[in-house]
Image: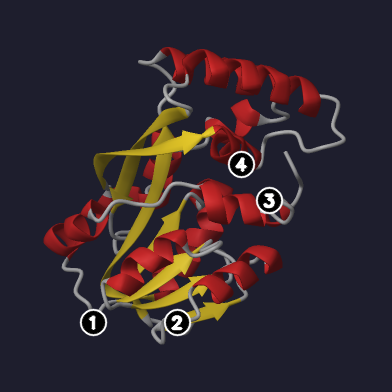
């Protein structure tokens, strides 16, 4: 895996903007009902990237501080969210956000938690959270079975992607989440999500993933040929449905970690 994961998306920004799935409104409703989220809550969206998750909370009226270490992703988020007066963008990372002590009610991490140093992030999040604040990692987790397209697409990624298994196995890792949340534990919910994509959009979705080979890599052309074959085999009226589970984890860090 890249020594510096913050650089992995620099060349993939436009595909990320256009082709990554968004998060369902049900996430806001869950946090409202379970965690006391209101429009007055202040959100630190850590690893905010191009602002996909930030936008969900901005539409809810929240003040959102997007914390993003990658310059290209951060600048894209600033551009895309420029119409929101309640959005602030900062250069920072999970282990050093630059935010003030006890300044936010929620720390969220959309499609980013698996890149964090667990102990460093835990210390930093405890510092910036107000008493009773919540940490909410979440992922749009692509389903890998249950439909022939999803299964063949998964086999293609395993065959051609440079470190797919290493990256994907870190998503939603219960042992890591347990270590992070400590004695206080955490809660989980999942919501169905999907994209309906034509060939060019599905190709862009493929290219947006940090583990897929880029042009010039020996696996790039073979992967794209295999992708075209899979798409043609399963498309209906020129489109493919990609199914996800939006997995939401939420808990407090008030309790000390267990040793």
Report the quarter where the N terminus lies. Answer: top right
Q: Mark 3 and 2 residues: CB-CB less than 8 Å, in contact? A: no
Q: CA distance from mark 2 to mark 1?
A: 19 Å
Q: Callout 3 environment at 10 Å: few (<14), some (14 to 19), or many (20+)?
A: some
Q: Secondary structure at mark 3?
A: loop
Residue underneath mark 2:
83
Q: Mark 2 and 4 residues: CB-CB less than 8 Å, in contact? A: no
Q: CA distance from mark 1 to mark 3?
A: 34 Å
Q: CA distance from mark 1 to mark 4?
A: 36 Å
Residue underneath mark 4:
204
The residue at 54%/52% (across/down) is 18
Q: Secondary structure at mark 2?
A: loop
Q: Looking at the image, is mark 1 or mark 3 nearer the viewer? A: 3
> Which quarter of the figure has residue 210?
top right
Q: Position of residue 25 (x, y in %)?
A: 25, 56
Q: CA distance from mark 4 to mark 3?
A: 9 Å
Residue underneath mark 1:
40
Disc on the earlier residue, 1 or 4: 1
The residue at 45%/28% (across/down) is 240
Disc on the earlier residue, 1 or 3: 3
**11 sits left or right of 51 in the view:** right
Disc on the earlier residue, 2 or 4: 2
As drawn, 208 above or below 43:
above
Disc on the earlier residue, 2 or 1: 1
Residue underneath mark 3:
12
Q: Secondary structure at mark 1?
A: loop
**184 sits left or right of 108 in the view:** left
């Amino acid at each position: 895996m890249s020594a510096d994961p913050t650089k992995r998306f620099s060349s993939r920004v436009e595909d990320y903007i256009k082709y990554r799935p968004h998060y369902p409104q049900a996430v806001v409703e869950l946090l409202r009902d379970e965690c006391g989220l209101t429009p007055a809550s202040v959100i630190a969206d850590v690893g905010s990237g191009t602002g996909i998750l930030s936008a969900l909370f901005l539409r809810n009226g929240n003040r959102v501080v997007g914390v993003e270490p990658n310059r290209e992703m951060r600048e894209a988020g600033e551009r895309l969210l420029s119409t929101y007066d309640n959005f602030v963008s900062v250069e920072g990372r999970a282990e050093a956000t630059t935010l003030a002590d006890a300044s936010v009610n929620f720390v969220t991490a959309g499609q980013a938690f698996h890149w964090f140093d667990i102990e460093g992030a835990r210390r930093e999040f405890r510092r910036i959270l107000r008493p009773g604040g919540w940490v909410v990692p979440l992922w749009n987790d692509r389903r890998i079975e249950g439909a022939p397209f999803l299964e063949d697409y998964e086999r293609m990624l395993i065959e051609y992607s440079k470190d797919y298994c290493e990256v994907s196995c870190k998503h939603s890792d219960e042992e890591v989440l347990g270590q992070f949340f400590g004695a206080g534990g955490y809660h989980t919910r999942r919501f169905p999500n999907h994209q309906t994509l034509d060939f060019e959009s599905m190709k862009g979705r493929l290219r947006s993933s940090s583990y897929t080979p880029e042009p010039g890599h020996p696996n790039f052309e073979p992967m794209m040929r295999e992708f075209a074959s899979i798409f043609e085999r399963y498309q209906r009226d020129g489109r493919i449905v990609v199914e996800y589970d939006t997995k939401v984890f939420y808990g407090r860090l008030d309790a000390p970690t267990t040793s």
